[in-house]
Amino acid sequence: MSPTIPYEYKYLRAKKRFPHVWCPGCGIGIVMGSIIRAVDAMGWDKDDIVMVSGIGCTSRMPVYVDFNTLHTTHGRGLAFGTGVKMANPRLNVMAVMGDGDSLAIGGNHIIHAARRNIDITAIIVNNNNYGMTGGQFSPTTPPGAKTSTTPYGMIEPGFDVCKLMDGAGASFVARGTVYHVTELDNMILKAFRKKGFSVVEALAPCPTNFGRANRLGGPVEMMQLLKDNTINLSQLKAMKPDQTEGKIVRGIFVDRDSISYGDRYAALCENARIGSGG
Amino acid sequence: MIVPWGETRLVQGNEAVALGAVAAGIGFFAGYPITPSTEIAELLAKYMPLLDKKWIQMEDEIASISALIGGRLAGSKSMTATSGPGFSLMQEGLGYACMTEVPIVVVNVMRGGPSTGLPTQAAQGDVMQARWGTHGDHPVIALAPCNVKECFELTIRAFNLSEIFRTPVILLPDEIIGHMRERVRFPLEEDVDVVPMPVPDVPVEWYEHYHESTSNVSPMASFGSGYRYHVTGLTHDKDGFPTRKEDEVIAKMERLKHKITRRLDELEDVQMHDVEESSVVIFAYGSVYRSALAAQAILKKKRKTVGIFRPVTLWPFPDRTVKEMLDSKDVVLVPELNQGQIIHEVERMTRDSVRVVPLHRIDGYEITPEEIVDAVMEVI
């Protein structure tokens, strides 16, 4: 029996760019797999897809996929993506970012992308620290956690990415993990289908830095933590408050229909022309 | 019709920049409000929807220039307008555009600095920031208009050069030029040379995102046009993929430099008045050039002949012409609205026997013709 090549491969720059830069046990490749499966389910032509990113481990993803790919400066993926989407609304634009990239240096851009409701899907791989530079704390590092820049423990509260994006006006907000892959595939697919700004936060392990600094074990143990420490929305409803203590909730938190920036801009152009008699 | 082709109008400098952008075929503007450049954004916010072109006010200047690069990669001629503090924030994106060879136009209407400085007053303090503001080795093209008509013409030229050289081009009017109003006779549309966005015409598998040679540029495909490629600020090979191979790194860095330094003839733009016959020459650009012209007329009445050398293209600096024309002079007076920036370039290109004399004004006001006359009288 000849081996079957998984269909995901046709979306990869398989011959050119591998092996990849990610460490053993890293979750980013799993998110890339989810993205590719969601892209396939959408039936998008590779020519019509733009993947933008900033700087960091997750932001290296564009180099591996056979789309129009744009690896930008730290935190600015969504700003570049906004320009791409404005200039050619026909393109399907997604931004892949880490927690530091999207929420610290890129924090201003992501809240305004959400407020504008620009038709882009942002996929945030949250591994609770800056992996590429060696494990410094990020805006999602949990209180007390050790990183290379919090040797005595993290004293800053972290962002809840989903609440932040809900408050800023995103049309679709979901949180999954790289352990719950089918659920993640589905969330990304729904985010792609959504007109307007959609956000999927994917919790992922970083055994090399965050895991080691906090003695969380290797890749397998960290996967187990994602399984044990998270519950989905239906579980949450069935559980008593004391049972949900310390658990992170997975699920789709926001799914609303509001007019995207692109559609509002197109209407503005039309009204301006009518108003000017043109 | 937004550009008053063939008509004569009283127009503001910033307005002429906005009209020049429309004439050049701007498809996308992203900006952030800042004095004294704001009229450019405001007028384009009015014009562009009428033309079904895209305009957006971003959350800051970093986002603006980032969006601009994205817009051009997706196939729209893109421009932003800012001033000193915003220009500082844009250095990150300017470096990225240099490195990834994406053509964009950045207008910096210069005000007094450093920092917030004198927001409503004039300066020429960003001349060196335009040249060296972003980190790393990089080429840059910068043009300095001296009147309202040139604001229109040089904006079009900035777009053209950015497309020809696949690099960001900076337009550097000072606040005086941006805010002055003058009568402008607009050309006929057919008399204006607009360079269209070059597009590749090779099969997809032959497409080279960056040119193989070290002194040429390839036509840049737009996202969505069927040529899929990778763009990164990491040092990359000719296909755009990150590399650390010595030969590929050198090829990239040399192309960034040579694509400009080997085509200086297309970039150099200087104006000279009575330079050959004068032993004293005023070297001036932007609004100061206007005062230099007036000073020359006053001096003529006093039977003193002075020459004027004016670079229209500030960067790349017209090294050869400066050397050829000024190296045998007794005195070169360099009046600038700063504490001495372009003067260093003049000194670099002239021998020690040439007295290069500075004249600074740093209080936000113009250098008057009388100040230049006095300075000339002092040196001759």
Image (spheres, rainbow, N blue to C red):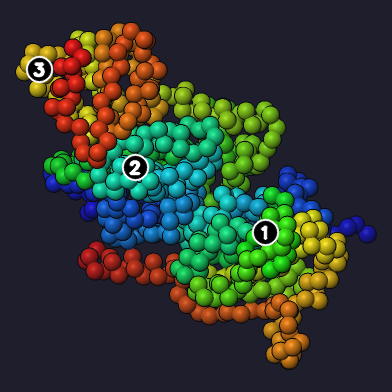
Quadrant in the rendering for residue B127: top left
Residue indicated by mark 3: B300
**x and y percent of residue A165 in the render?**
55, 72
In this rendered view, identify the residue nearer to me: B65 or B281: B281
Identify whether B59 is placed above or below B309.
below
In this rendered view, identify the residue nearer to me: B35 or B140: B35
CA neighbours of label 1 inside 10 A, class few (<14), some (14 to 19), many (20+):
many
Residue drawn 51% across the image and 33% down it: B138
The numbered disc on residue B113 is 2
CA neighbours of label 3 inside 10 A, class few (<14), some (14 to 19), many (20+):
few
Where disc 3 sits, the SS reads helix
Return the residue found at the far left: B301
Front of the two marks 3 and 1: 1
**x and y percent of residue A190 in the render?**
62, 74
Q: Can residue B140 be seen in this view?
A: yes
Return the residue found at the far front: A152
Is the C-beta separation of discs 1 and 2 under 8 Å? no
Residue drawn 26% across the image and 13% down it: B331
**x and y percent of residue A221 in the render?**
86, 67
Is the C-beta separation of discs 2 and 3 under 8 Å? no
The numbered disc on residue A137 is 1
**x and y percent of residue B146 in the render?**
23, 34
Q: Can residue B108 be seen in this view?
A: no
